Image (spheres, rainbow, N blue to C red):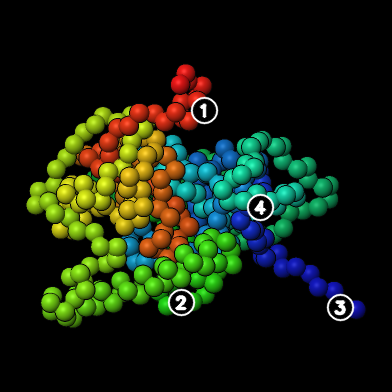
Amino acid sequence: MTVTTQRPDVRPTFSIGEVVEVKPAEEILAGLDERGELDALPFMPEMLPFCGRRFVVDSIAHKTCDTATWTGLRRLEDTVHLTGLRCDGQAHGGCQAGCLIFWKTAWLTRVSGPTQDRNGSTPIPLQLRAPEPSTPGVSPPPSACSGCTPERLTEVAHGACRPREAGSDEPVYSCQATELTRAAPVGIPLWDVTQYVRDVRSGNAPARQVLRGIAIGAFNRMQDLTRDKLPERLRIRGGRRYPFIRGTAHRTPVESLGLQPGEWVRVKSLEQISATLNAENLNRGMAFDREQLKYCGRTARVLRRVEHIIDESTGRMQTMKTPCIVLADVVCTADYHRSCPRRVYAYWREIWLERVPTPLTASRAAGDNP
């Protein structure tokens, strides 16, 4: 009789909508290296409060956009995003980017019970749970990592493992975003069909969205080639990428509305926004991204003003000369970025927004008088 045993390095796989529990902190820390990483992906201090709590798998992070060196999409393995879990930046100088956190599947355990859909129709409440008692006489599986401590996580977050310029006392932060090219060293070309199959099979994106993204990606690649090789008279829309956004301002204007968290705004029309962009579709150095088009004309609640974020390529804190706005639930859905599941927040100049009264439904939900 042949007995098969599971390899100790085999990690669990999860599906969108599954309920999982983040393992106890001491168990996760024991499996990290001296940089506080697993497979070069940092476990950040901001993740510790989630240990022992249950959440829903939102997406399978088998690929992600490279926002550090802008080389395109990169491949990840054994990694997921959990619904609503974003970094609050408290251990990273108060960075306000609010990045969606990456979770290695080795840091999670499956919870038996019904699954939830990714829209959260029956959301799982956040709940604390005591660690499972260990079984006497049973040792944990061996690990190739040397272990870590919460104090070490904080040291690494503040740049203990990153070079600093001689004579400079400016912090050089380290987080999942700054180390993404190490955690995902392999790029994924546009023509790699397996990524699209995984998008659909995992539930990250419907087939219609994936096919549309492939077509747009191929068209935009052709536009890039024609812009370099053909005279302007032979180019489609001047060789610009789809969708065709064209700024018309010679000098980009600025406007301050003094927006505060909780206020409601409407995103202006594309025509109004285009008048504030230069030929590179920038306003005061900030791009109006194609993913923001779908929100034109929609209303949303102001989540916060963003004044400082970490530069993912250098690890240094950047202070914005002109603060921007983040809107609640207004994220990149990667319609034009090959269904990347990272869901980064879209940044808005105040000149692209206009105040509107608080919607009646929102007032009632907050307990206000209509």
Horizontal and vertical percent for residue 304?
36, 35
User: How dense is the environment of label 2, judged by Cα within 10 Å: few (below 14), some, or many (20 and up)?
Assistant: few
Q: Which is more N-terminal, label 2 or label 1? A: 2
- Mark pair 2, 4: CA separation: 28 Å
At numbered mark 3, what does the secondary structure look like: helix, strand or loop? loop
| Mark nearer the viewer, 3 or 4 | 4
Q: What residue does disc 3 label? A: 2
* Observer-nearest of 176 and 359: 359
* Circles 3 and 4: CB atoms closer than 8 Å: no
Q: Give the quarter of the figure containing the N terminus.
A: bottom right
Left-right relation of 156 to 52: left
| Mark nearer the viewer, 1 or 2 | 1
Q: What residue does disc 1 label? A: 365
Horizontal and vertical percent for residue 270?
25, 51
At numbered mark 2, what does the secondary structure look like: helix, strand or loop? loop
- Find residue 18 and name its label: 4
Q: Is residue 129 visible?
A: yes
Which residue corresponds to the image point at 81% horizontal and 73% vertical from the top-left?
Answer: 4
- Mark pair 1, 4: CA separation: 28 Å
Q: Which is more N-terminal, label 1 or label 3? A: 3
Horizontal and vertical percent for residue 71?
34, 66
